[in-house]
C-alpha cells in the first residue's frame, strides 16, 4: 500500500526532530548535519531506529539541508547526490532492521538563499537545485518527498514543480509561520493552503513555527480554505528559549499526546514533531492515538465558517499571563544607550534576567535626551537576552501618522507590551528647540490601540490586515497633589481599555490603598493590575535629592534617617528598604516596576532575588 492509500485509512504518525537529537549527541550547530550520512552514519541510523521503536510510521531522511546552495557553505556542493542517496539508504536500513512497515520520506528544506523577486537567485536556478535533490532521493528509493519549513511561497512552488517534473512520488509541501500566524513574507494560512493546493502538492503541511497550540489554530484555517485537502502537522516543542547556553523547548511529551488527538480531530492526516521533539514525544502521541479511538473532546472542533478567523492571532504576552494568573511580576526599567554601543545594556539585561526579572521596560528618550531608538533596544534584548520587553511609547513629538506607523513597526519586531505615556517635554532636554507637538494624549492612544489596532483597524477605520495583540500599560501617580484630577485621569484610561498600570516611585506602603479608595468611592471597584514603582535609594544625598527636588516623591523621615546612619553602606540599606516595602505592598500590588539608579543593576538583582 502506498502513501496516499494509507492516508485514507487514518492518521499516520511521523517522527520527531533529527537536528535536536544530533545536537544532543554533541554535534554543533555550525556543522553540516547532512554530511553525517557519510561521516557518522551510525548516529543518524540510531536516531531513525529510536523513532521507529517509539512508534513512528513514517521517518524523514537526514537531508534537510542537502541541496547545492547549502552544501556549498561547507565545500560539499559536488556531493549532493551522494549525501542524499546515503540519507535514504540509512533510513531504509533502519526500517528493514525493525521488521515494521514504515514509510521513508525524502526530506527537502529551504535553499538558504532568497529567490526572485525578493532575492537574486532566479526561479529556474532554484528549481534546478531542487530537482537535483529530488531526483537523488527518488532514485535512492524514497517513497515520498517532503518539502518542509518553507517561508517563501515563491520558493516552495518552485520546489513542488521540480518534484513533479523529475519524479512520480507524492509530495508533501509544508510551510512555517511566525508568531503572528503569517509567513516571513506576510502570507496567511488560508492563502498558503490554496497556493500549495494549486501548485500540485498532494499534502498541505505546517511545521516548525511555535508549539502545538499555534499549529492547531493554523491547521483549522488551512482546512477551512481547502476543505478536501490532506494535511501534515509537525509542531516545535513550543518556542525555544536559551537557558545556560543551551536551547530548551518547554512542551513535554504528555502535552504533545493531548494535542495529537486535537490534530487528528481537526483533520490532520499526518502528525509528528519538529524542533525540540524526541522519541518520547512520539511515544506519547502513539499512546494517545491507541488509547482514544474516539476523537478528542467537543472543545476542539474544525471550524467551517468565519469563526476560525475570530480566534486570537497569538497567545497573550508572558506579562499578561502572569498578571491574569495573579502571580507577582517583576519589571525593571532600562534606558537606551546614548551612542552605538549596546554591550553594557545587554550585560545589564542578562544580569537582571538571570536574577529573575520577568520583563525589561525600555524607556524612550527619558528626560528628552537623545538616545538609541527604544524599538531597537527592545528587539536586541528579546533576541539576544531572551527576556520579554515593554516598550515605553510617548505620545509627545508624534503626530497621528507617526504614532500608527511606529505601532506597526513595534509589532513587526515582536514587541507586544507597550507602556503609553505623555513623555518628557523637549524643553528640558538636549534639543529644547525641537518640535513638541502631539495629536493624542495617553488615554486617546490607549483607545486607538485597544479599540482600533487590536481590532484590526487604524484610526480612520481602515483595515490593517490583521489585529495586533498589544498589551497596554499606562502611568499612575499614587501620591498626587490633586487626588481628584488623578482619579479623573485614571478613570479615563480605564474606560479606554488599559490593561495594567505602572506607578511613580513610592516609599510608603499605604500610598496605593489611599488612592484606590478615592477611586472606588467615585467609580466602583478597581480591577486593573498595578505594578508599584520602586526606585532604590543609593545614598543619603540621593534620598534627600529625591525627597526635596522630585515632584510626587515623599520619603519618610525614618527611611532617610536609616540611609544617613548607614554612611558608606547606604546602598545596602537602600536594598533593605526596597525589600521591606515590596513585602508590605503585596496585598494590593500585582507586581513591581523597579527603576535602577546610576546603572546599579547589581542592587536591583539583589532586590529581585530577595522578593521572588
Image (tube, helix red, strand yellow):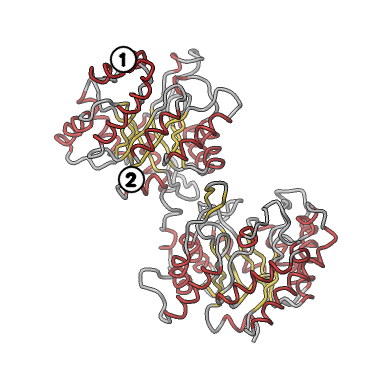
Report the residue marked by disc 1.
Answer: 564
| Secondary structure found at label 2 | helix
Q: Classify 10 Å Cα crowding around label 1: few (below 14), some (14-19), many (20 and above).
A: some
| Residue at screen point 51% across, 28% down | 336
| Residue at screen point 53% across, 43% down | 412
Q: Quadrant of residue 610?
A: top left
With 591 as the anchor, is 257 left or right in this view? right
> Mark 2 or mark 1: which is in front?
1
Q: Classify 10 Å Cα crowding around label 2: few (below 14), some (14-19), many (20 and above).
A: many
- Locate the C terminus and report the quarter of the image it occupies: top left
* Image coordinates for residue 462, horizontal then vertical, percent: 46, 45
| Mark sitting on residue 323 | 2
Please indicate, yes or no, whether residue 201 appears anywhere in the rendered image: no
With 64 as the anchor, is 260 left or right in this view? left
| Secondary structure found at label 1 | helix
* Image coordinates for residue 507, horizontal then vertical, percent: 27, 25
* Image coordinates for residue 258, horizontal then vertical, percent: 43, 69
In contact (CB < 8 Å): disc 2 and disc 1: no
Please indicate, yes or no, whether residue 323 appears anywhere in the rendered image: yes
| Residue at screen point 58% across, 30% down | 342
Amino acid at each position: 500500500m502506498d502513501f496516499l492509500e494509507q492516508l485514507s485509512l487514518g492518521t499516520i504518525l511521523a517522527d520527531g526532530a533529527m537536528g535536536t537529537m544530533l545536537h544532543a549527541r554533541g554535534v554543533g550547530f555550525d556543522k553540516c548535519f547532512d554530511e553525517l550520512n557519510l561521516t557518522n552514519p551510525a548516529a543518524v541510523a540510531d536516531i531513525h531506529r529510536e523513532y521507529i521503536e517509539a512508534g513512528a510510521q513514517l521517518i524523514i531522511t537526514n537531508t534537510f539541508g542537502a541541496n547545492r546552495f547549502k552544501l556549498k557553505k561547507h565545500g560539499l556542493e559536488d556531493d549532493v547526490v551522494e549525501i542524499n542517496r546515503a540519507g535514504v539508504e540509512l533510513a531504509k536500513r533502519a526500517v528493514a532492521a525493525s521488521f515494521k512497515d514504515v514509510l521513508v520520506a525524502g526530506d527537502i528544506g529551504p535553499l538558504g538563499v532568497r529567490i526572485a523577486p525578493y532575492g537574486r537567485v532566479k526561479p529556474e536556478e532554484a528549481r534546478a537545485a531542487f530537482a537535483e535533490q529530488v531526483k537523488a532521493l527518488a532514485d535512492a528509493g524514497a517513497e515520498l518527498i517532503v518539502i518542509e519549513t518553507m517561508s517563501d511561497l515563491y520558493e516552495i512552488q518552485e520546489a513542488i514543480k521540480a518534484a513533479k517534473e523529475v519524479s512520480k512520488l507524492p509530495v508533501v509541501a509544508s510551510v512555517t509561520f511566525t508568531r503572528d500566524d503569517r509567513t516571513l513574507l506576510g502570507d496567511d494560512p488560508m492563502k498558503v493552503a490554496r497556493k500549495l493546493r494549486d501548485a500540485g502538492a498532494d499534502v498541505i503541511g505546517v511545521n516548525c513555527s511555535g508549539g502545538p497550540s499555534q499549529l492547531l489554530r493554523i491547521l483549522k484555517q488551512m482546512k477551512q480554505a481547502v476543505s478536501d485537502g490532506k494535511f501534515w502537522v509537525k509542531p516545535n516543542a513550543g518556542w525555544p528559549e536559551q537557558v545556560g547556553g543551551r536551547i530548551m523547548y518547554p512542551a513535554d511529551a504528555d502535552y504533545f499526546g493531548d494535542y495529537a488527538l486535537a490534530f487528528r480531530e481537526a483533520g490532520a492526516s499526518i502528525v509528528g514533531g519538529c524542533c525540540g521533539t524526541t522519541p518520547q514525544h512520539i511515544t506519547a502521541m502513539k499512546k494517545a492515538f491507541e488509547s482514544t479511538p474516539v476523537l478528542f473532546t467537543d472543545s476542539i472542533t474544525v471550524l467551517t465558517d468565519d469563526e476560525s478567523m475570530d480566534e486570537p492571532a497569538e497567545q497573550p504576552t508572558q506579562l499578561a499571563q502572569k498578571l491574569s494568573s495573579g502571580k507577582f511580576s517583576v519589571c525593571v526599567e532600562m534606558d537606551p544607550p546614548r551612542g552605538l554601543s549596546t554591550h553594557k545594556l545587554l550585560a545589564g539585561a542578562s544580569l537582571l534576567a538571570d536574577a529573575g526579572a520577568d520583563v525589561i521596560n525600555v524607556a524612550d528618550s527619558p528626560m528628552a535626551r537623545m538616545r538609541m531608538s527604544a524599538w531597537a533596544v527592545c528587539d536586541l534584548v528579546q533576541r539576544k537576552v531572551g527576556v520579554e520587553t515593554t516598550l515605553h511609547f510617548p505620545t509627545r513629538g508624534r503626530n497621528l501618522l507617526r504614532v500608527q506607523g511606529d505601532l506597526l513597526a513595534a509589532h513587526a519586531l515582536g514587541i507586544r507590551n507597550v507602556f503609553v505615556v505623555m513623555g518628557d517635554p523637549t524643553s528640558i532636554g538636549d534639543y529644547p528647540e525641537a518640535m513638541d507637538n502631539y495629536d493624542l494624549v495617553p488615554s486617546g492612544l490607549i483607545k486607538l490601540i485597544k479599540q482600533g489596532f487590536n481590532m484590526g483597524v487604524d484610526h480612520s477605520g481602515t483595515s490593517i490586515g490583521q489585529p495586533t495583540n498589544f498589551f497596554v500599560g499606562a502611568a499612575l501617580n499614587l501620591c498626587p497633589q490633586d487626588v481628584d484630577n488623578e482619579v479623573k485621569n485614571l478613570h479615563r484610561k480605564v474606560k479606554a481599555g488599559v490593561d495594567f498600570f505602572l506607578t511613580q516611585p513610592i516609599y510608603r506602603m499605604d500610598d496605593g490603598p489611599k488612592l484606590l479608595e478615592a477611586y472606588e468611592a467615585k467609580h466602583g471597584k478597581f480591577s486593573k493590575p498595578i505594578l508599584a514603582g520602586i526606585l532604590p535609594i543609593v545614598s543619603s544625598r540621593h534620598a534627600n535629592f529625591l525627597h526635596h527636588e522630585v515632584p510626587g516623591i515623599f520619603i519618610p523621615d525614618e527611611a532617610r534617617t536609616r540611609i544617613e546612619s548607614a554612611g558608606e553602606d547606604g546602598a545596602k540599606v537602600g536594598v533593605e528598604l526596597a525589600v521591606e516595602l515590596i513585602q508590605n505592598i503585596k496585598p494590593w500590588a500585582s507586581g513591581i516596576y523597579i527603576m535602577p539608579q546610576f546603572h546599579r543593576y547589581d542592587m536591583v538583582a539583589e532586590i529581585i532575588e530577595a522578593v521572588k
